[in-house]
C-alpha cells in the first residue's frame, strides 16, 4: 500500500470510489461546513463560458458524481459532452443526474492516463479534483492535450498541499492518530504549488487562480462524519461515527472546528 492513500490504486479504485456513498458523504460534510469560498463547479463553468463558444465539444475528466458535469451541461449547452471516470458506479450517478436534469451528455469508463478518445476531439476539457490521484499527472495531462484540438482550452483544478491541515492537529490532539501530522498531504502529486509547472509540460498556461475556502464544522458529530470519509487518518475505534463523535467531544475544546483549503484553477490552451 502506498504511504499516500490518494495514490494507492487499490484504494482509489476500490473503497474510495467503487460506490457513490463515500464520496457523497465526504462532499456533503464539507459543503455543510463551508463558510467562505466559491462553488468550484460555478467557477469552472464561468472560466469556460468566457472562452468557449456555445455548441462546443467538452470533456469532463474524473467526473466523480457529476457535479461539475451537470453545471457544464447547463451553462455551456455543449454540442457534445463526455464525462470520463474509472468508476462505473460514479458514472451511473453522473448519467442519472444529467438525465434527471434533462441535460445531454454521455459517460465513458476509462483511466485518464489512456483515454479511449480520438485526437483533437474536444474544444474544452475539465479535470477537477482528480489528477492528485495520479503518481504521474503530467502523463494524464499529455492525454488530455492529445484529445484537445489545437487552441482548445483545459481547466485543471486542485487543492493546496496544506488543505485541512488543522484537522491533522485536532485528530492528533484528541490522541486518535499520533501520525496524522507527519503523514504526507493527500494532494502531494498535484497541488496548488506545482499545478502551473505540471500543466506547462504540455499546455500553454494562460492563468492560475487561487482561492482560500474556510470550513467550520459545527459540532463533534459533523466533524466525525467528515473524518470517517477521508482516508488520511488511521483511527482505531469501534462504534462508528457516534463513537468517534463521543471521543472528539470528550477530548477537544468546544466547537466549531475550523479548517481551510486553497482551491486552484489553471486555464491553459493547447498550442
Ligand atoms: C473527487 S472525485 C472528482 C470530482 C469531480 N471532478 C467534481 O468536480 O465533482 C475524483 C474522481 O477521480 C476518479 N479517478 C481517480 N483515478 C482515476 C483514473 N486513473 N482515471 C479516471 N478517473 C480516476 C475517481 O474515480 C473519482 O471519481
Image (tube, rainbow, N blue to C red):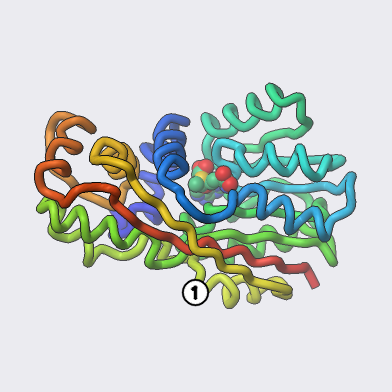
Q: In the depicted view, which residue is nearer to us: 80 or 111?
A: 80
The answer to which quarter of the image holds residue 260 is bottom left
Q: Position of residue 141 (x, y in %)?
A: 63, 63
Relative vertical location of residue 188 with respect to residue 6 in this rendering, above or below: below
Q: Which percent across, then down, holds residue 117?
A: 74, 47
The relative height of residue 165 versus residue 201 in the rendered view (above or below) is above
Residue positioned 60% across, 39% down in the render = 67
SS for dot 1: loop
Residue in the image at 67% along x and 47% along y: 60
Residue density around tag 1, few if under 14, some if 14–19, many if 20 or more, within 10 Å: some
Residue 31 horizontal/vertical position (percent): 47, 42
* In-front residue for pair 62/97: 97
Looking at the image, the residue that sits furthest to the top is 100
Q: x and y percent of residue 134 in the render?
A: 48, 58
Number of numbered markers: 1
Quarter-wise, where is residue 142 in the image? bottom right
Which quarter of the picture shows residue 178?
bottom left
* Vertical side of 193 occupied by 251: above or below: above
Q: Quadrant of the C terminus?
A: bottom right
**Residue depicted at 52% across the width and 37% down the height:** 87
Relative to residue 94, is residue 89 drawn left or right?
left
The residue where tag 1 is placed is 193
Residue 145 relative to residue 37: left or right: right
Name the residue located 43 percent from the left edge and 40 percent from the top edge.
Answer: 32
* Above or below, 267 relative to 11: below
Amino acid at each position: 500500500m502506498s504511504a499516500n492513500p490518494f495514490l494507492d490504486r487499490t484504494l482509489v479504485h476500490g473503497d474510495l470510489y467503487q460506490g457513490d456513498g463515500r464520496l457523497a458523504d465526504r462532499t456533503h460534510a464539507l459543503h455543510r461546513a463551508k463558510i467562505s469560498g466559491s462553488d468550484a463547479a460555478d467557477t469552472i463553468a464561468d472560466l469556460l463560458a468566457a472562452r468557449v463558444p456555445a455548441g462546443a465539444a467538452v470533456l469532463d475528466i474524473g467526473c466523480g458524481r457529476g457535479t461539475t458535469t451537470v453545471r457544464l451541461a447547463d451553462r455551456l449547452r455543449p454540442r457534445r459532452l463526455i464525462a470520463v471516470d474509472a468508476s462505473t458506479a460514479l458514472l451511473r450517478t453522473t448519467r442519472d443526474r444529467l438525465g434527471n436534469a434533462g441535460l445531454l451528455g454521455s459517460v465513458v469508463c476509462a483511466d485518464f492516463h489512456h483515454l479511449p478518445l480520438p485526437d483533437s476531439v474536444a474544444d474544452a476539457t475539465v479535470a477537477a479534483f482528480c489528477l492528485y490521484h495520479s503518481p504521474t499527472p503530467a502523463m494524464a495531462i499529455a492525454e488530455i492535450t492529445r484529445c484537445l484540438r489545437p487552441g482548445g482550452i483545459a481547466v485543471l483544478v486542485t487543492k493546496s498541499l496544506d488543505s485541512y491541515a488543522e484537522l491533522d492537529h485536532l485528530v492528533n490532539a484528541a490522541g486518535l492518530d499520533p501520525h496524522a501530522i507527519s503523514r504526507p498531504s493527500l494532494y502531494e502529486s498535484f497541488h496548488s504549488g506545482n499545478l502551473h509547472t505540471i500543466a506547462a509540460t504540455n499546455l500553454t498556461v494562460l492563468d492560475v487562480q487561487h482561492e482560500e475556502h474556510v470550513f467550520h464544522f459545527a459540532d463533534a458529530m459533523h466533524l466525525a462524519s467528515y473524518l470517517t470519509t477521508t482516508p488520511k487518518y488511521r483511527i482505531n475505534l469501534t462504534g462508528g461515527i457516534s463513537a468517534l463523535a463521543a471521543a472528539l467531544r470528550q477530548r477537544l475544546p468546544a466547537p466549531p472546528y475550523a479548517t481551510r483549503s486553497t482551491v486552484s484553477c489553471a486555464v491553459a490552451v493547447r498550442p
